[in-house]
Every structure is written in structure tokens, then in C-alpha cells.
Image (spheres, rainbow, N blue to C red):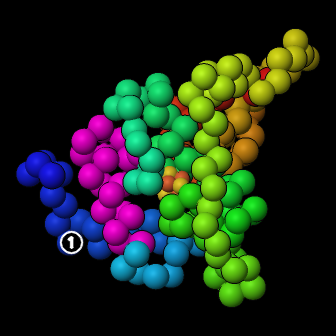
């Protein structure tokens, strides 16, 4: 690991508190195992310093934002995996049922499709020629939040994903 990648324990603690706060504010839970979670957050910070954006610590990034966008944490697969398996692929986020011990945590399969398939899916989710609308509708690819406004918000108010994770829905 290069010097650039060494992250101080204070930075990890600060980021950990922020992830915790944002998760609660958005109705999510981060893994209550603080040591495990801080390890993942340290991986996110390393990736942030390496690539300029925090890619998933459990997946291999390409180092090119266009290819990595769907695995910038929170990834596009988080919500589906939390519902289905009780946790995201890394188990940084877990379901309420898993938190309360009602949903046993198992190993989580990779939900990210292969690259060729991802490229095919880049087409907008719907293609309506709906000219009654006076404003475009934007959809957060992470949590599905929709809003009608001139442009996507800087940060998703629900899951805190950045503007670049929005797609034009209608
Ligand atoms: S939400 Fe996605 S990107 Fe973030 S830690 Fe979990 S699996 Fe990785």
C-alpha cells in the first residue's frame, strides 16, 4: 500500500460516524460490528484516495468512473441485496430484520451483472414520449427515489447518492 493510501484511525472514526448518521437518516442500518464496519470504511477511504471516488471495498474497480459508477458506495445493488439477503454484498449495510436477529446473515452472492450486460442496461429505465410533463423526472439508481425538476439533486435526499447516480426517468 502506498503512503497516499494510508488512512488515519481518526479519519476512519469520523467517516464511520458519518456513515452511521447518514444510514439512520435514510432509514438504513450499518453493520453493528464496529470493527468489521470500520475495516470496510477504511477500504472505502483508500479507494476514494486512489480513484477519487469511494468504490466498493469488496469489488475490483477499473479506475475509470464510467465503468465504476454502479459500484460507488452505496452501490446500485445495495437495496435489492439488503432486502433479499439481509445485507449488501460487503455486509456494510444490513436489514432491520438482520439487525434484530430475525434474518440470519448468509454469504451474499454477487448481484452485479458482467460488464457486457451492464452496458446493455444503460438505456433509460423507461422511454416514454410523454410531452404532457413540464419537468423531466429523475430517478436515483441507488434507491429509486423520483423527483420532477429541471435537473437531478446534488445529493439524493433518501440515500445520499450523488447527482451522477441519477438517470432521466421520464
Ligand atoms: S453498499 Fe455496495 S458498495 Fe457499499 S459496501 Fe455495500 S456492497 Fe459495497
What is the quadrant of residue 122 in the picture? Answer: top right
Q: Tell how many labels.
A: 1
Q: Is residue 170 left or right of residue 104?
A: right
Query: Residue at 31% of width from left, 47% of height from top?
Result: 47
Q: Is residue 44 magenta?
A: yes
Query: Residue at 64% of width from left, 72% of height from top?
Result: 106
Task: Decide if residue 24 is in sight here.
Answer: no
- Residue 8: percent from left, percent from top: 17, 66
| Chain part drawn in magenta | 37-55
Please name whichever residue, 44 or 132, is drawn nearer the observer in this view of the structure.
Answer: 44
- Residue 15: percent from left, percent from top: 34, 65
Q: Secondary structure at mark 1?
A: helix
Q: Residue furthest bottom?
A: 101
Compared to 107, does 56 lie above or below? above
For label 1, the crowd category at 10 Å Cα-Cα, with few meaning under 14, some 14 to 19 and many 20 or more, is: few
Q: Which residue is mark 1?
A: 10
What is the quadrant of residue 34 in the picture? Answer: bottom left
Task: Decide if residue 105 is in sight here.
Answer: yes
What is the quadrant of residue 116 in the picture? Answer: top right
Compared to 100, does 153 lie above or below? above
Please name whichever residue, 168 or 92, is drawn nearer the observer in this view of the structure.
Answer: 92
Please name whichever residue, 112 or 154, is drawn nearer the observer in this view of the structure.
Answer: 112
Which quadrant of the figure contains the C terminus?
top right
Amino acid at each position: 500500500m502506498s503512503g497516499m493510501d494510508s488512512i488515519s484511525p481518526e479519519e476512519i472514526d469520523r467517516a464511520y460516524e458519518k456513515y452511521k448518521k447518514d444510514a439512520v437518516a435514510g432509514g438504513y442500518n450499518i453493520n453493528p460490528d464496529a470493527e468489521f464496519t470500520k475495516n470496510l470504511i477504511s477500504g472505502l477511504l483508500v479507494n476514494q484516495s486512489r480513484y477519487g471516488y469511494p468504490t466498493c471495498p469488496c469489488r475490483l474497480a477499473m479506475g475509470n468512473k464510467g465503468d465504476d459508477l454502479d459500484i460507488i458506495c452505496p452501490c446500485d445493488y445495495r437495496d435489492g441485496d439488503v432486502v433479499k439477503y439481509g445485507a449488501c454484498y460487503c455486509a456494510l449495510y444490513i436489514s432491520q430484520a438482520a439487525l434484530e436477529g430475525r434474518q440470519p446473515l448468509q454469504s451474499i452472492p454477487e448481484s452485479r451483472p458482467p460488464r457486457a450486460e451492464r452496458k446493455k442496461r444503460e438505456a433509460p429505465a423507461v422511454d416514454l414520449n410523454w410531452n404532457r410533463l413540464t419537468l423531466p423526472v429523475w430517478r436515483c439508481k441507488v434507491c429509486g427515489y423520483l423527483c420532477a425538476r429541471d435537473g437531478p439533486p446534488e445529493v439524493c435526499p433518501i440515500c445520499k447518492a450523488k447527482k451522477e447516480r441519477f438517470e432521466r426517468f421520464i
